[in-house]
Image (cartoon, rainbow, N blue to C red):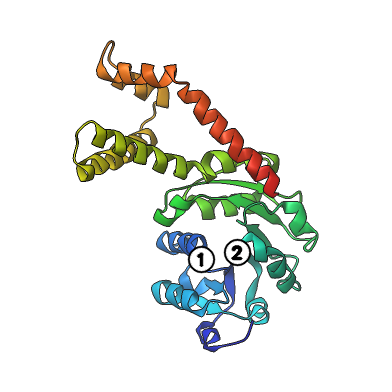
């Protein structure tokens, strides 16, 4: 990376660094600034793409650079570093970060990159691996976090707090992250597919295409919001909608007769198997 005028935004030591200024890193930063978990001037973005870092700098007033040496010089002793880069450049980024302090904390959101692979380069640092999903872009992510043996409970809670600002974050064993990938990582796509299917079904039942899509989108959004805000289980909420011998019961009985649950299970099994292949 070459030093540019991006470095003119660096005015103080940073407590949080993002390597990569893509959609996920930007979404996390927006959540943190919005919730005042970090002040904008405590955050630095490092990315080769000057347009992307210019955009995030203008929007949030964070500090930026495209030089790893400049980044490392301006990290606080206990700074957290979020690795928000694509898997194909992950090893290159790790190599460029060599020389950070042992007290710096590494947080990877790169798919398929294990804690062990990071420890090969940073054997003495606390390392966290987090799997967020794309609703992070609207601060509604479902994230799961795992940590290496050097990680403290205090810093685990600190990292969870970061990801709780963009949704909900739970702690799991690293071996469970492939299941997390299948469930919540890929999960938004299943919901989008269901929206497509419901929209198409509405059209075939005689509804106007735009009306069918509007109703399908709002129905899924409303149902999800009700589940989040309610203290009741999904089954209890379903039972409330399902009157005996009513229209909902007829639809659900058809789904069950066509092995709806098995279809969902097999979809998640396929996604988990692929996640394991990519590790």
| 186 relative to 70, above or below | above
| 143 relative to 261, above or below | below
Measured as percent of width and height from the top left, residue 208 is found at 19, 41
The reply to whether callout 2 and callout 1 are in contact (CB within 8 Å) is: yes
Residue 166 visible in the picture: no
Give the quarter of the figure containing the N terminus.
Answer: bottom right
Circle 2 sits on which residue? 85
Residue at 56% of width from left, 88% of height from top? 4
Quarter residue 229 falls in: top left
Residue at 32% of width from left, 21% of height from top? 251
Residue furthest to the front:
204
Measured as percent of width and height from the top left, residue 202 is found at 26, 34
| Element type at mark 2 | loop
Circle 1 sits on which residue? 22
Residue 191 visible in the picture: yes
Measured as percent of width and height from the top left, residue 62 is found at 48, 74
Q: CA distance from mark 2 to mark 1?
A: 8 Å
Measured as percent of width and height from the top left, residue 126 is found at 72, 57
Task: Indicate left or right for 211 with 74 as reference.
Answer: left
Residue at 66% of width from left, 53% of height from top? 128
Marker count (numbered) = 2
Q: From the viewer's side, name the closer residue of 47 and 153.
A: 47
| Element type at mark 1 | loop
Q: Is disc 1 surrounded by few (<14), some (14 to 19) or many (20+) residues within 10 Å?
A: some
Mark sitting earlier along the chain (2/1): 1
Q: Is disc 2 surrounded by few (<14), some (14 to 19) or many (20+) residues within 10 Å?
A: many
């Amino acid at each position: 990376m070459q030093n540019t005028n991006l470095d003119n935004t660096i005015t103080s030591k940073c407590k949080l660094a993002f390597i990569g200024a893509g959609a996920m890193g930007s979404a996390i930063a927006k959540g943190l600034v919005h919730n005042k978990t970090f002040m904008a001037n405590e955050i630095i973005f490092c990315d080769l793409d000057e347009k992307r870092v210019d955009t995030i700098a203008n929007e949030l007033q964070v500090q930026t650079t495209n030089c790893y040496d400049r980044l490392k010089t301006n990290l606080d002793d206990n700074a957290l570093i979020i690795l928000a880069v694509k898997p194909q450049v992950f090893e290159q980024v790790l190599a460029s970060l060599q020389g950070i302090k042992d007290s710096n904390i590494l947080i990877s959101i790169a798919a398929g990159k294990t804690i062990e692979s990071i420890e090969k380069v940073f054997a003495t640092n606390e390392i966290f691996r987090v799997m967020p999903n794309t609703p992070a872009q609207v601060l509604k992510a479902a994230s799961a976090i795992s940590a290496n043996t050097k990680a403290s409970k205090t810093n685990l809670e600190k990292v969870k707090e970061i990801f709780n600002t963009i949704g909900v974050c739970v702690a799991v064993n690293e071996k469970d992250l492939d299941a997390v990938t299948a469930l919540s990582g890929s999960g938004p796509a299943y919901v989008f597919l269901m929206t497509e299917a419901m929209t198409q079904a509405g059209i075939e039942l005689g509804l106007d295409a735009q009306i069918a899509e509007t109703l399908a989108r709002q129905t899924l959004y409303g149902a999800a919001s009700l589940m989040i805000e309610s203290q009741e289980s999904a089954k209890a909420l379903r039972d409330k909608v399902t009157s005996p011998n009513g229209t909902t019961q007829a639809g659900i009985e058809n789904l069950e007769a066509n092995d709806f649950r098995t279809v969902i299970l097999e979809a998640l099994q396929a996604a988990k198997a692929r996640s394991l292949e990519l590790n």
